[in-house]
Image (cartoon, grey):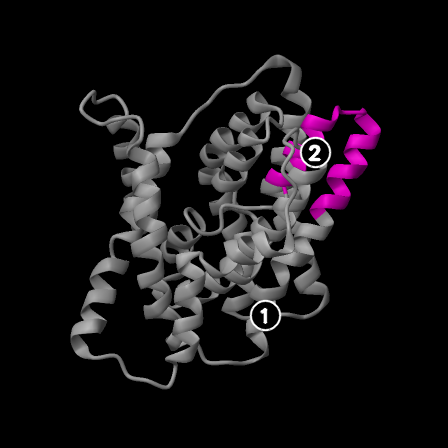
Amino acid sequence: MENFIIITTYLLIGVLLRRVPQFPNETGQVLNLFVIYVALPATVLLKIPELSFSQDLLVPVLMPWVMLILSCVMVLLLTRIFRWERQITGSLLLLVPLGNTSFLGIPMVKAFFGEKAISYAVLYDQFGSFLALAIYGSVIIALYGGGKDRPTIKGVCNKIITFPPFIALLLAFALRSTNYHPVALEIFRSLSATLVPAVMIAVGFQLSFRLSRDVVMPFAMGLLLKLAVAPFTALILCKLLSLEGQAVQVSIFEAGMPPMVSAGALALLAGLAPSLTVALVGFGIGLSFITLPVLYSFL
Protein backbone atom coordinates (compact mmCIF):
# COMPACT_ATOMS: atom_id res chain seq x y z
CA MET A 1 0.00 0.00 0.00
CA GLU A 2 2.86 2.37 0.82
CA ASN A 3 4.40 1.93 -2.65
CA PHE A 4 1.00 2.39 -4.27
CA ILE A 5 0.58 5.72 -2.44
CA ILE A 6 4.04 6.79 -3.63
CA ILE A 7 3.16 5.98 -7.26
CA THR A 8 -0.14 7.86 -6.98
CA THR A 9 1.75 10.86 -5.60
CA TYR A 10 4.10 10.85 -8.61
CA LEU A 11 1.06 10.70 -10.91
CA LEU A 12 -0.55 13.70 -9.18
CA ILE A 13 2.72 15.64 -9.43
CA GLY A 14 2.60 15.14 -13.20
CA VAL A 15 -1.02 16.32 -13.33
CA LEU A 16 -0.17 19.44 -11.31
CA LEU A 17 2.96 20.25 -13.33
CA ARG A 18 0.83 20.39 -16.48
CA ARG A 19 -0.86 23.44 -14.96
CA VAL A 20 2.46 25.23 -14.38
CA PRO A 21 3.17 27.55 -17.35
CA GLN A 22 6.94 27.12 -17.03
CA PHE A 23 6.64 23.47 -18.10
CA PRO A 24 6.29 23.20 -21.91
CA ASN A 25 3.78 20.88 -23.58
CA GLU A 26 6.63 18.58 -24.59
CA THR A 27 7.62 17.84 -20.96
CA GLY A 28 5.87 14.47 -20.91
CA GLN A 29 7.51 13.43 -24.17
CA VAL A 30 10.95 14.49 -22.91
CA LEU A 31 10.49 12.39 -19.77
CA ASN A 32 9.38 9.45 -21.94
CA LEU A 33 12.54 9.76 -24.03
CA PHE A 34 14.66 9.83 -20.87
CA VAL A 35 12.98 6.62 -19.73
CA ILE A 36 13.46 4.90 -23.10
CA TYR A 37 17.10 5.91 -23.57
CA VAL A 38 18.39 5.93 -19.98
CA ALA A 39 16.25 4.70 -17.08
CA LEU A 40 14.71 1.59 -18.67
CA PRO A 41 17.98 0.31 -20.23
CA ALA A 42 19.70 0.78 -16.86
CA THR A 43 16.92 -1.21 -15.17
CA VAL A 44 17.22 -3.98 -17.76
CA LEU A 45 20.99 -4.21 -17.30
CA LEU A 46 20.54 -4.29 -13.54
CA LYS A 47 17.67 -6.78 -13.24
CA ILE A 48 18.00 -9.32 -16.06
CA PRO A 49 21.30 -10.83 -14.78
CA GLU A 50 19.48 -11.63 -11.52
CA LEU A 51 17.13 -14.07 -13.29
CA SER A 52 17.42 -17.77 -12.57
CA PHE A 53 16.47 -19.57 -15.78
CA SER A 54 13.67 -22.11 -15.51
CA GLN A 55 10.44 -23.12 -17.24
CA ASP A 56 8.69 -20.34 -15.30
CA LEU A 57 10.31 -17.78 -17.63
CA LEU A 58 8.31 -19.16 -20.56
CA VAL A 59 5.12 -17.74 -19.05
CA PRO A 60 6.04 -14.01 -19.24
CA VAL A 61 7.46 -14.59 -22.74
CA LEU A 62 4.44 -16.46 -24.15
CA MET A 63 1.58 -14.87 -22.21
CA PRO A 64 1.52 -11.54 -24.11
CA TRP A 65 1.23 -13.37 -27.43
CA VAL A 66 -1.60 -15.56 -26.16
CA MET A 67 -3.38 -12.44 -24.91
CA LEU A 68 -2.78 -10.69 -28.24
CA ILE A 69 -4.43 -13.51 -30.20
CA LEU A 70 -7.40 -13.77 -27.84
CA SER A 71 -7.89 -9.99 -27.74
CA CYS A 72 -7.84 -9.78 -31.56
CA VAL A 73 -10.46 -12.49 -31.83
CA MET A 74 -12.72 -10.74 -29.29
CA VAL A 75 -12.34 -7.32 -30.97
CA LEU A 76 -13.10 -8.73 -34.43
CA LEU A 77 -16.11 -10.60 -33.04
CA LEU A 78 -17.48 -7.42 -31.45
CA THR A 79 -16.82 -5.49 -34.66
CA ARG A 80 -18.92 -7.99 -36.56
CA ILE A 81 -21.73 -7.79 -34.00
CA PHE A 82 -21.83 -3.98 -33.71
CA ARG A 83 -20.66 -3.24 -37.28
CA TRP A 84 -18.12 -0.64 -36.23
CA GLU A 85 -16.33 1.31 -38.95
CA ARG A 86 -12.78 0.43 -39.96
CA GLN A 87 -11.13 3.29 -38.05
CA ILE A 88 -12.73 2.18 -34.79
CA THR A 89 -11.77 -1.45 -35.45
CA GLY A 90 -8.18 -0.43 -36.20
CA SER A 91 -7.94 1.62 -33.01
CA LEU A 92 -9.30 -1.23 -30.89
CA LEU A 93 -7.01 -3.78 -32.57
CA LEU A 94 -4.04 -1.66 -31.53
CA LEU A 95 -5.08 -0.59 -28.05
CA VAL A 96 -6.82 -3.67 -26.64
CA PRO A 97 -4.11 -6.30 -27.32
CA LEU A 98 -1.17 -3.97 -26.50
CA GLY A 99 -0.85 -3.00 -22.85
CA ASN A 100 1.19 -0.34 -21.07
CA THR A 101 3.50 -3.04 -19.73
CA SER A 102 6.62 -0.87 -19.62
CA PHE A 103 5.91 2.74 -18.63
CA LEU A 104 3.11 1.80 -16.23
CA GLY A 105 3.60 -1.95 -15.90
CA ILE A 106 7.12 -2.02 -14.49
CA PRO A 107 6.46 0.60 -11.76
CA MET A 108 3.19 -1.12 -10.81
CA VAL A 109 4.86 -4.54 -10.68
CA LYS A 110 7.53 -3.07 -8.42
CA ALA A 111 4.87 -1.52 -6.17
CA PHE A 112 2.81 -4.72 -5.79
CA PHE A 113 5.41 -7.50 -6.10
CA GLY A 114 8.73 -5.90 -5.13
CA GLU A 115 12.11 -5.37 -6.79
CA LYS A 116 12.76 -9.02 -7.67
CA ALA A 117 9.64 -9.25 -9.82
CA ILE A 118 10.79 -6.49 -12.19
CA SER A 119 12.79 -9.02 -14.23
CA TYR A 120 9.61 -10.88 -15.15
CA ALA A 121 7.92 -7.60 -16.13
CA VAL A 122 10.89 -6.74 -18.37
CA LEU A 123 10.64 -10.12 -20.14
CA TYR A 124 6.89 -9.69 -20.63
CA ASP A 125 7.41 -6.21 -22.05
CA GLN A 126 10.47 -6.74 -24.27
CA PHE A 127 9.69 -10.19 -25.71
CA GLY A 128 5.96 -9.57 -25.80
CA SER A 129 4.53 -6.05 -25.86
CA PHE A 130 7.46 -4.33 -27.56
CA LEU A 131 7.91 -6.95 -30.29
CA ALA A 132 4.15 -6.99 -30.82
CA LEU A 133 4.11 -3.21 -31.18
CA ALA A 134 6.90 -3.32 -33.76
CA ILE A 135 5.56 -6.28 -35.78
CA TYR A 136 1.82 -6.57 -35.13
CA GLY A 137 1.38 -2.80 -34.78
CA SER A 138 2.94 -2.20 -38.19
CA VAL A 139 0.60 -4.73 -39.78
CA ILE A 140 -2.52 -3.15 -38.22
CA ILE A 141 -1.42 0.33 -39.35
CA ALA A 142 -0.89 -1.06 -42.86
CA LEU A 143 -4.34 -2.68 -42.94
CA TYR A 144 -6.42 0.00 -41.24
CA GLY A 145 -4.40 3.23 -41.46
CA GLY A 146 -4.88 5.79 -44.18
CA GLY A 147 -1.19 6.33 -44.88
CA LYS A 148 0.54 5.31 -48.10
CA ASP A 149 3.61 3.82 -46.46
CA ARG A 150 3.53 0.08 -45.87
CA PRO A 151 5.71 -1.73 -43.35
CA THR A 152 8.66 -3.73 -44.66
CA ILE A 153 10.52 -6.59 -42.99
CA LYS A 154 13.67 -4.47 -43.03
CA GLY A 155 11.89 -1.51 -41.43
CA VAL A 156 10.34 -3.63 -38.68
CA CYS A 157 13.66 -5.36 -37.90
CA ASN A 158 15.42 -1.99 -37.82
CA LYS A 159 12.92 -0.69 -35.24
CA ILE A 160 13.55 -3.71 -33.05
CA ILE A 161 17.35 -3.79 -33.12
CA THR A 162 17.72 -0.02 -32.60
CA PHE A 163 15.35 0.21 -29.62
CA PRO A 164 17.55 1.09 -26.59
CA PRO A 165 15.86 -1.20 -24.01
CA PHE A 166 16.06 -4.12 -26.46
CA ILE A 167 19.77 -3.45 -27.03
CA ALA A 168 20.19 -3.37 -23.24
CA LEU A 169 18.30 -6.67 -22.99
CA LEU A 170 20.69 -8.38 -25.40
CA LEU A 171 23.68 -6.93 -23.53
CA ALA A 172 22.25 -8.06 -20.20
CA PHE A 173 21.94 -11.64 -21.44
CA ALA A 174 25.45 -11.51 -22.91
CA LEU A 175 26.86 -10.23 -19.59
CA ARG A 176 25.02 -12.68 -17.33
CA SER A 177 28.22 -14.45 -16.33
CA THR A 178 30.11 -11.19 -15.76
CA ASN A 179 30.20 -9.33 -12.46
CA TYR A 180 29.67 -5.60 -12.90
CA HIS A 181 32.33 -3.23 -11.59
CA PRO A 182 31.06 -1.59 -8.35
CA VAL A 183 31.04 1.84 -10.01
CA ALA A 184 29.02 0.54 -12.98
CA LEU A 185 26.64 -1.23 -10.61
CA GLU A 186 26.06 1.99 -8.65
CA ILE A 187 25.43 3.91 -11.89
CA PHE A 188 22.84 1.34 -13.00
CA ARG A 189 21.17 1.45 -9.58
CA SER A 190 20.99 5.25 -9.42
CA LEU A 191 19.65 5.55 -12.98
CA SER A 192 17.20 2.68 -12.42
CA ALA A 193 15.87 4.50 -9.35
CA THR A 194 14.66 7.33 -11.63
CA LEU A 195 12.42 4.97 -13.62
CA VAL A 196 9.32 5.04 -11.43
CA PRO A 197 9.17 8.79 -10.69
CA ALA A 198 10.02 9.76 -14.30
CA VAL A 199 7.44 7.38 -15.78
CA MET A 200 4.59 8.24 -13.45
CA ILE A 201 5.17 12.01 -13.63
CA ALA A 202 5.21 11.72 -17.44
CA VAL A 203 1.98 9.71 -17.39
CA GLY A 204 0.32 12.26 -15.11
CA PHE A 205 1.50 15.11 -17.31
CA GLN A 206 0.03 13.49 -20.44
CA LEU A 207 -3.28 12.26 -19.02
CA SER A 208 -6.24 13.27 -21.16
CA PHE A 209 -9.92 12.57 -20.50
CA ARG A 210 -11.92 13.35 -23.62
CA LEU A 211 -14.76 11.23 -24.95
CA SER A 212 -16.99 11.73 -27.98
CA ARG A 213 -20.56 10.42 -27.76
CA ASP A 214 -20.30 8.41 -30.98
CA VAL A 215 -17.57 6.17 -29.57
CA VAL A 216 -19.09 5.40 -26.16
CA MET A 217 -19.88 1.76 -27.00
CA PRO A 218 -16.49 0.80 -28.51
CA PHE A 219 -14.81 2.76 -25.71
CA ALA A 220 -16.70 0.85 -23.00
CA MET A 221 -16.22 -2.53 -24.68
CA GLY A 222 -12.53 -1.84 -25.34
CA LEU A 223 -11.73 -1.01 -21.72
CA LEU A 224 -13.84 -3.91 -20.47
CA LEU A 225 -11.81 -6.30 -22.60
CA LYS A 226 -8.47 -4.72 -21.71
CA LEU A 227 -8.87 -4.19 -17.96
CA ALA A 228 -11.13 -7.09 -16.98
CA VAL A 229 -11.72 -9.82 -19.58
CA ALA A 230 -8.08 -10.19 -20.70
CA PRO A 231 -6.44 -10.51 -17.26
CA PHE A 232 -9.12 -12.79 -15.84
CA THR A 233 -8.92 -14.96 -18.96
CA ALA A 234 -5.17 -15.18 -18.32
CA LEU A 235 -5.87 -16.07 -14.69
CA ILE A 236 -8.29 -18.84 -15.66
CA LEU A 237 -5.88 -20.25 -18.25
CA CYS A 238 -3.07 -20.39 -15.70
CA LYS A 239 -5.36 -22.09 -13.17
CA LEU A 240 -6.44 -24.69 -15.75
CA LEU A 241 -2.80 -25.39 -16.63
CA SER A 242 -1.81 -25.50 -12.93
CA LEU A 243 0.75 -22.73 -13.43
CA GLU A 244 1.97 -21.07 -10.24
CA GLY A 245 4.73 -18.81 -8.94
CA GLN A 246 5.65 -15.15 -9.10
CA ALA A 247 6.45 -15.24 -12.83
CA VAL A 248 2.90 -16.40 -13.48
CA GLN A 249 1.39 -13.81 -11.14
CA VAL A 250 3.35 -10.98 -12.77
CA SER A 251 2.29 -12.19 -16.24
CA ILE A 252 -1.39 -12.15 -15.28
CA PHE A 253 -0.94 -8.73 -13.66
CA GLU A 254 0.75 -7.35 -16.80
CA ALA A 255 -2.12 -8.72 -18.90
CA GLY A 256 -4.38 -6.30 -17.02
CA MET A 257 -2.41 -3.15 -17.86
CA PRO A 258 -4.31 -0.33 -19.63
CA PRO A 259 -3.79 0.45 -23.34
CA MET A 260 -0.22 1.23 -24.38
CA VAL A 261 0.61 4.93 -24.80
CA SER A 262 2.92 4.17 -27.75
CA ALA A 263 0.17 2.18 -29.48
CA GLY A 264 -2.13 5.16 -28.96
CA ALA A 265 0.45 7.42 -30.56
CA LEU A 266 0.64 5.09 -33.58
CA ALA A 267 -3.15 5.05 -33.86
CA LEU A 268 -3.28 8.85 -33.76
CA LEU A 269 -0.58 9.18 -36.41
CA ALA A 270 -2.56 6.79 -38.62
CA GLY A 271 -5.82 8.72 -38.02
CA LEU A 272 -7.56 5.78 -36.38
CA ALA A 273 -10.58 7.18 -34.48
CA PRO A 274 -8.64 9.93 -32.60
CA SER A 275 -11.32 10.64 -29.97
CA LEU A 276 -11.66 6.93 -29.17
CA THR A 277 -7.88 6.46 -29.04
CA VAL A 278 -7.31 9.38 -26.66
CA ALA A 279 -10.18 8.26 -24.41
CA LEU A 280 -8.94 4.65 -24.23
CA VAL A 281 -5.44 5.73 -23.21
CA GLY A 282 -6.49 8.47 -20.76
CA PHE A 283 -9.40 6.75 -19.04
CA GLY A 284 -7.62 3.40 -19.21
CA ILE A 285 -4.70 4.66 -17.12
CA GLY A 286 -7.04 6.31 -14.63
CA LEU A 287 -9.27 3.25 -14.22
CA SER A 288 -6.28 0.92 -13.92
CA PHE A 289 -5.55 2.40 -10.49
CA ILE A 290 -8.82 0.77 -9.44
CA THR A 291 -8.75 -2.44 -11.51
CA LEU A 292 -5.12 -3.44 -10.85
CA PRO A 293 -5.49 -3.64 -7.03
CA VAL A 294 -8.65 -5.70 -7.58
CA LEU A 295 -6.80 -8.01 -9.98
CA TYR A 296 -3.91 -8.34 -7.52
CA SER A 297 -6.30 -9.46 -4.79
CA PHE A 298 -7.17 -12.53 -6.93
CA LEU A 299 -3.55 -13.57 -7.43
The stretch in magenta equals 71-96
Where 175 falls versus 93 (above or below)? below
Crowdedness near tag 2: few (<14), some (14–19) or many (≥20) residues, C-alpha within 10 Å: some
Task: Residue at 21%, 22% (x, y): give it.
Answer: 20
Query: For numbered disc 2, what is the local secondary structure?
Result: helix
Q: Name which quarter of the figure residue 220 lies in.
A: top right
Q: Which residue is mark 1?
A: 244
Quarter of the image for the C terminus: give it.
bottom right
Task: Residue at 56%, 21% (x, y): give it.
Answer: 275
For this view, does 243 lie left or right of residue 114? right
Give the x, y percent position of residue 69.
Answer: 72, 52
For this view, does 36 lie left or right of residue 129? left
Query: For numbered disc 1, what is the local secondary structure?
Result: loop
* Circle 1: residue type: Glu
Give the x, y percent position of residue 117.
Answer: 42, 65
* Circle 2: residue type: Tyr
Residue 118 or residue 235, whichever sits in front: 118
Crowdedness near tag 1: few (<14), some (14–19) or many (≥20) residues, C-alpha within 10 Å: few
Mark 1 or mark 2, which is nearer to you? 2
Task: Residue at 35%, 61% (x, y): give it.
Answer: 41
Numbered marks: total: 2
Q: Answer whether residue 224 is magenta in the image.
A: no
Where 54 falls versus 278 (above or below)? below
Give the x, y percent position of residue 46.
Answer: 32, 69
